[in-house]
Amino acid sequence: MGLISGDSRGQLFSLDILFALIPLVLVLGMVASDMDNITYLIQDTVYRGSTERVAADTLNTLLETSGDPTNWEQNGSVNVVGIAKYDSTKGIPLEGTVSAGKLTALNVSNMQKLIGNEYGFYLNITTIDDSTILKSIGTNNVGASGAGINSTASDIVRVEKVANYARLDVVSSIKDAIRDAGVPRTYTSPPNPFPTNNFYLTIYDYYVLVVNNGYDSATVDINSNTVIKGNNFNGQSTRHANITEQIDESFLKNMTTLQDNTVTVRTVSNPHSSMDVYIIQAPKGTPEDQISLDNIKPKPCRVILFLWTN
């Protein structure tokens, strides 16, 4: 015969279950009371993850594509904006590059079209060597540092990439042009023809830049119009100098559709000399002293995009 009756053992078992359930009830109560916070945190994480993806996709599209159409900067009509240079010979964008022409044409409207109206943005592109601002568009309430951008927004996402940018675009060139077997030589293709139309001529100026390594005389013609003349060379003073001349607009094709302009280089003298010739496309109004070898060399730039939900 046991010390505790069957009924007593049943009561004790019920009490054990009751005591065991008390912590569970307390936990469930705490969870229920905090459910709104948990739901908010889940939603916030989802929204932020979505914003981060949109920001990353936007920057990838900008720097890895030339846009749709690839020559959208020519007439301002764009379906999807992209600022990578386009290799027309290979028919592909040059990923990680920034076209000076496309960057000039980039504006708030075509950026907003890419991102969508549900997001606000601020895009800042600067050179890495001296932090010169190349492009700054969108909403920035504070300044270049980026701290506190659009302080009324929450969950601001920041994405950054490095790309190569040249302030000026080279549209045709030839390097190491020399005399052939001691006699003058004519070069064409290369330098390859370059396209213009009437829209291009409203937004760009065109220059010939000659990097001279010993010549006393040479000519550069555009569509059979002489731009660099023999008298641009002044003996010893220009034998190892750069010579720059703007191409007269009347020399260039200005129809509605793009047409090629031919480039002809004729090297006259001297033996053991060479020269490089660049046809440069510059935004309208670019000072002539900016038409330089340094400004056509690609340099790294920092591309930063801030994104937030409106």
Image (spheres, rainbow, N blue to C red):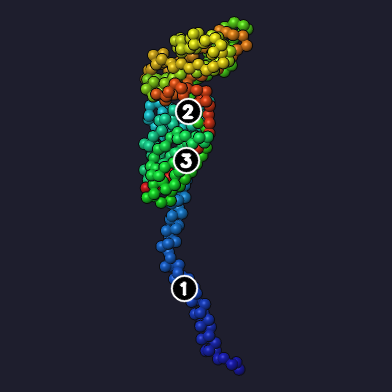
Image spot of residue 144 (x, y percent): 44, 41
Determine which residue is flagged by label 3. Answer: 304
Kind of residue sitting beneath label 2: Arg
Residue found 52% across the figure and 36% down from its top: 128
The quarter of the picture where residue 32 lies is bottom left
The quarter of the picture where residue 239 lies is top right
Q: Quadrant of the N terminus?
A: bottom right
Q: Secondary structure at mark 1?
A: helix
Residue 167, numbered label: 2
Q: Does residue 91 appear in the picture of this structure?
A: no
Q: Residue furthest bottom?
A: 1
Determine which residue is flagged by label 1. Answer: 26
Q: Does label 3 or label 2 sit earlier along the sequence?
A: 2
Kind of residue sitting beneath label 1: Leu
Q: Residue furthest top?
A: 183
Kind of residue sitting beneath label 3: Ile
Local crowd size for mark 3, using a 10 Å CA cut-off: few (<14), some (14–19), many (≥20): some
Residue found 39% across the figure and 16% down from its top: 249
Local crowd size for mark 2, using a 10 Å CA cut-off: few (<14), some (14–19), many (≥20): many
